[in-house]
Amino acid sequence: MKAIIYGAGALGCFFGARLQQGGHDVTFIARGAHLEALQRHGLRVESSSGDFCLEHVDATSEIAHLTPADLIFFAVKNYDVAASAAAMAGLVGPGTAILTVQNGVWAQPHLAAAFGAQRVLPGVVMMPAEIKEPGVIRTPAEAELGGITFGPYEGGSSELGARMLAAFAQSGVPATLSDDIWQSLWKKFIPLSSYAAITAATRLNIGAIRETEVTRALLKSLIGETASVARASHGTVPGDAGQSAFDMLMGLPPHLHASMLGDLLRGRRIELEWLSGEVIRRGRELGIATPSHQFAYAVLAPYANGRPEGSP
């Protein structure tokens, strides 16, 4: 299978590396120092399941010379989705599957509108990952949270989905093909939007939040708001999804935090608009109050486009 990792950040590189280990032809689309390191030294993955290194990877920032792929693993940040989707149109052929792993519930409809819902396989990944340094990916909880769930945009079954499931199985990646992927997307969005808001707003790992009663209560309120929005948006979201999300976050290793906090601390743009911002917007449309997310949004809004001038 020919695969293009469009957005070779931490998750893109991890899954691309696994696919290459499985014998697939993988091209990584990257930029900057990370691209240079991939081209010069290959890709190293530091994982709780065992470290490994690919001494050679096909990495580039130029896509004009590339031909359509069997799989586009679409892993850019939400704020780059629209521009990246327009740029990659030439990589999409008649049989191309677009497996998208963005946080939230906005990117998937955008890609379906751009390329057709039948091509789009929304995916859910719960595993934290980061670029430790250019060319080096760290996945601190792969053994506990590794793997991917994906499925057809409109539900049911699809030949594309079955082909991608086989490719992941060949590469040793735990994968699940869902016939109701939107339930999975919303079930992830409930803890993710809340986890990102609380860890970024407090600048704390989940362990310290868990041990502080009033902060833990704020997290529970954030989860409750998103769960109400999720259940009103998609009928198959379980009634106990909020409690399940809270229990899952309470069970995480204490040193973990959302990737949005890592971006904030590095002075990068953050995905606030697609997390708490999405909860707030949908809450207004549905008549659901979201005061905790509104508070988190107000605290984090100055950092939406990077570290504000004059801040510590």
Image (spheres, rainbow, N blue to C red):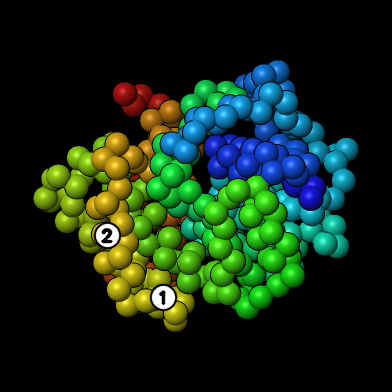
Q: Residues within 10 Å of mark 2 (few under 14, many from 20)?
A: many
Vertical side of 43 occupied by 213: above or below: below
Vertical side of 303 occupied by 101: above or below: below
Kindly tell me whether residue 131 is visible in this rendering.
Answer: no
The image shows a total of numbered marks equal to 2
Q: Residue furthest top?
A: 40
**Which element type, helix, strand or loop, lies under badge 1?**
loop
| Quadrant including the C terminus | top left
Which is more N-terminal, label 1 or label 2?
A: 1
Residue type marked 2 = Phe
Q: Residue furthest left?
A: 213
Residue displayed at 74% across by 42% down: 23
Q: CA distance from mark 2 to mark 1?
A: 15 Å
Numbered circle sitting on residue 49: none
Q: Label 2 belongs to which residue?
A: 246
Residue displayed at 26% across by 59% down: 247
Q: Residues within 10 Å of mark 1 (few under 14, many from 20)?
A: many
**Which element type, helix, strand or loop, lies under badge 2?**
helix
Percent position (x, y) of residue 217?
A: 17, 56
| For residue 224, side relative to residue 154 (left or right) | left
Foreground of the two, 147 or 29? 147
Residue type marked 1 = Val
Vertical side of 50 occupied by 177: above or below: below
Q: Label 1 belongs to which residue?
A: 237
Residue 290: name its quadrant: bottom left
